[in-house]
Amino acid sequence: MSVSRHSVSDWDVNPAPEAPVAPESLKESGLTNGFVCDMLLRTLYARGVMLGRDLATFLCLPFKVIREPLKFLKDEKLIQVDGGDLVGEVSYRFSLTDLGRDRAKAAMEQCAYIGPAPVPLEDYVEQCYRQTVTGLMCYPEALKAPFGHLVLKEDMFNAIGPAIISGRSVFIYGPPGNGKTAMARAIGDFMNTAGGSIYIPYAFVADGNIITVFDPSLHVVDDVADEYGDEADAAVRKLLNAGATDPRWVRIRRPVIVTGGELNLQMLDLRYSAESKFYQAPIHFKANGGVFLIDDFGRQLVSPKDLLNRWILPLEDRHDFLTVASGKKFQVPFEQLIIFSTNLDPKALVDDAFLRRIRHKVGINAPARDVYERIFAANCKRLGMNYDQQAVDYLYEKYYSKGRTPRASDCRDLLETVQSICRYRRHPVHLTRDLMAEAAGSFIAEFT
């Protein structure tokens, strides 16, 4: 499982959706007084004495939102004020009383989550539909940059753009070694660099259950210059000023999450921690607003049939369901571009009902000789190696004209073998017919 990470493209033609606005009150936060009180108790229990502004920063809520819960806890003698300066309540030092420590322990036993306050499920769903993958702006000039390293026929290149714009699933198939994964990842690169940014919450709450969404190992934060200037000063100002972006949300590049043979059905369900008593969103859920690539489809731990049964309705209806330990289900968006990449026969993997739900099907076959030579030349350039037509002629005379099907990946693999031979012999890296014959004898001959 991995995530694509690239710099922002000059062709970033998709503006970010409207940012969620920081709540002005506890009611606007979508959270109850009791819920925030429990979060405050758990935070003070885990971190000790904290300033009011630090509590607000840690919970990603304006101080005006936590003022009422803090007052309630103080009135109930669960917390105490240990001092402060003339700045006001934001500078007060808060700590737990003995009674508060007992109450905090009880709260930790119910749920041990501390960190940014969650947003309501309804707010997450609404934001998802503001930043869907359907209808993204995409045109040839913007698409060529992430595909620049690939050698594609024009008709194949022109089929990719409409697939991205549709936001529907894509099935890429064909014999191994001809660039299916590279093409799928290039689609992901476009989404990640030119698809614009989106907002996701650190976590959301549904019927009292906290479900974490933001994953720093999978999501690439989109750093935007702060309108207030100094970062430390901005953090305080955002907690006090109206109209600021809700800090419970993270601005990220559209996610590109790649999974391969490790995919199983459990990864598509909520992950519950019996120790901490909260949930982590499933892997495909974290791809909402972006791309979820299933590489080597058909070789996963989950069978294609089981995946079909799990996803046949989400692919059609664009929503999925999450089930918590109590058995209650919550409807959530299924807003992502799903890419299936396989070198197996699609008809042997899935039935017509599944294929019908995959709008775009792209077959990638063995390259014709002119395309092969262009790929070969591009790899020579990448490796800083001279292009030698006789080396290519040798491959066709010895192998490709005698039954072996050429693969685009042969160019890379053979030339890197030549490079290794040269380096081992302490010779300048160069290409000749004889060196290609030696490399091919090692790489190809045993399989013919």
Image (cartoon, rainbow, N blue to C red):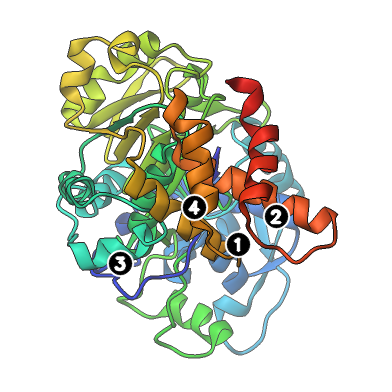
> Residue drawn at (53%, 42%), measured in percent from left and top?
394
Q: Nearer the viewer, mark 3 or mark 2?
A: 2
Q: Nearer the viewer, mark 2 or mark 4?
A: 2
Q: Position of residue 421 (x, y in %)?
A: 76, 50
Q: Quick one: label 1 or label 4, which is nearer the N terminus?
A: 4
Spatial separation of the CA atoms under disc 3 and disc 4: 29 Å
Callout 2: helix, strand or loop? helix
Marks 1 and 2 in Cβ contact (< 8 Å): yes
Spatial separation of the CA atoms under disc 3 and disc 2: 55 Å
Q: Which residue is mark 4?
A: 4
> What amino acid type is highlighted by mark number 2?
Gln
Camera sees residue 288: yes
Q: Nearer the viewer, mark 1 or mark 3?
A: 1
> What amino acid type is highlighted by mark number 1?
Leu
Q: Position of residue 179 (x, y in %)?
A: 41, 41
> What amino acid type is highlighted by mark number 4?
Ser
* Above or below for 42 versus 295: below
Spatial separation of the CA atoms under disc 1 and disc 3: 49 Å
User: In the rendered image, which quarter is residue 285 located in?
Assistant: top left
Camera sees residue 205: no
Q: Quick one: label 3 or label 4, which is nearer the N terminus?
A: 4
Q: Which residue is mark 3?
A: 21
Q: Which residue is mark 2?
A: 419
The single residue placed furthest to the right in the displayed view is 425
> What amino acid type is highlighted by mark number 3?
Val
* Above or below for 356 versus 338: above
Badge 2 density bin: few <14, some 14–19, many ≥20, Cα 10 Å = many
